[in-house]
Image (tube, rainbow, N blue to C red):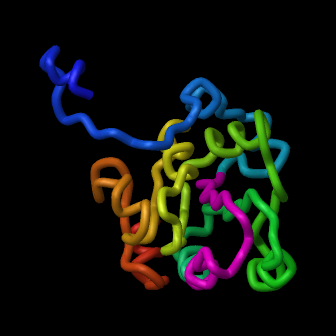
């Protein structure tokens, strides 16, 4: 950082983690992927992460209940697996569950979405937020934990009040 600052480059911040900006990039957007999942004319709202209730998935469920009545053209896609999968399937019958993804499957899912919705208040950093940003996808996250440090509300994404489904839906709209 000091070397860059000495060269006149300012507004720098050290991030102890990062993402592969070649792998997570907007060029991996795939119309074929969207067609294969019947998402061609949809606004894709993606959640990526382990499916555990500790990630405030109840907020996601409640916010989606609100969003789907306001935005018929939106589709909820979940990339990940975990112990909450079966119950989430029952609560979100219209959602697309992709299961655990990695590599090109994951980078394509990110880049082929419009919004990354992440309600977790327990993340200490939130690498998935950086993966969304690197993929050209707007993050909408709880204003807590790592997200609060990574997102400048209204500039690099949107933040909503933690565990507030109505505010989450509003910020996602």
The front one of 150 and 172 is 150
* Residue 43 among magenta residues: yes
Visible in this render: residue 173?
no
Say if 158 sits above or below 68 in the image.
Answer: above
Q: Residue at x 71, y 33 (%)?
A: 30
Q: Observer-nearest residue: 167 or 58?
A: 58
**In the image, is 108 to the left or to the right of 81?**
left
- Quarter holding the N terminus is top left
Magenta region, residue range? 42-62
Q: Is 32 drawn above or below residue 143 in the view shown?
A: above
User: Residue 46, how many percent across, how many down?
Assistant: 63, 57
Q: Could you say which quadrant of the image residue 20 lies in?
A: top right
Query: What percent of the width, then of the height, locates residue 25?
Result: 57, 30
Say left or right for 50 vs 171.
right
Q: Residue at x 42, y 68 (%)?
A: 145
Percent across and percent down for residue 78 are 72, 62
Q: Tell me the quadrant of the picture where the C terminus can be found.
A: bottom left
User: Could you tell me if residue 104 is visible in this image?
Assistant: yes
Q: Residue sitting at 73 percent across and 51 percent down? A: 39
Examine the image and state in which quarter residue 53 appears: bottom right
Q: Is residue 171 left or right of residue 59?
A: left
Place of residue 156 in the rendered image (x, y in percent of width and height, measured from the top left) = 34, 48
Of 105 and 18, nearer the camera is 18
Above-or-below relation of 108 to 48: above
Q: What residue occupies the far front of the structure in this picture?
A: 2
Residue 57 magenta-highlighted: yes
Q: Nearer the viewer, residue 118 or 147?
A: 147
**Tally of numbered tags:** 0
């Amino acid at each position: 950082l000091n070397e860059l600052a000495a060269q006149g480059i300012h507004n720098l911040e050290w991030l102890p983690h990062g993402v592969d900006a070649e792998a997570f990039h907007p060029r991996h957007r795939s119309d074929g992927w969207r067609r294969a999942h019947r998402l061609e004319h949809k606004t894709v709202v993606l959640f990526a992460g382990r499916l555990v209730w500790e990630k405030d998935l109840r907020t996601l469920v409640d916010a989606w209940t609100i969003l789907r009545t306001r935005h018929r053209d939106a589709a909820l896609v979940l990339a990940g697996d975990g112990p909450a999968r079966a119950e989430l399937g029952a609560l979100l019958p219209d959602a697309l569950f992709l299961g655990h993804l990695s590599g090109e499957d994951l980078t394509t899912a990110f880049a082929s979405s419009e919004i990354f919705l992440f309600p977790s208040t327990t993340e200490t950093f939130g690498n998935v937020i950086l993966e969304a940003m690197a993929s050209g996808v707007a993050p909408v996250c709880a204003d807590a934990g790592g997200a609060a440090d990574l997102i400048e509300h209204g500039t690099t994404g949107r933040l909503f009040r933690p565990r507030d489904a109505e505010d989450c839906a509003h910020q996602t709209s």
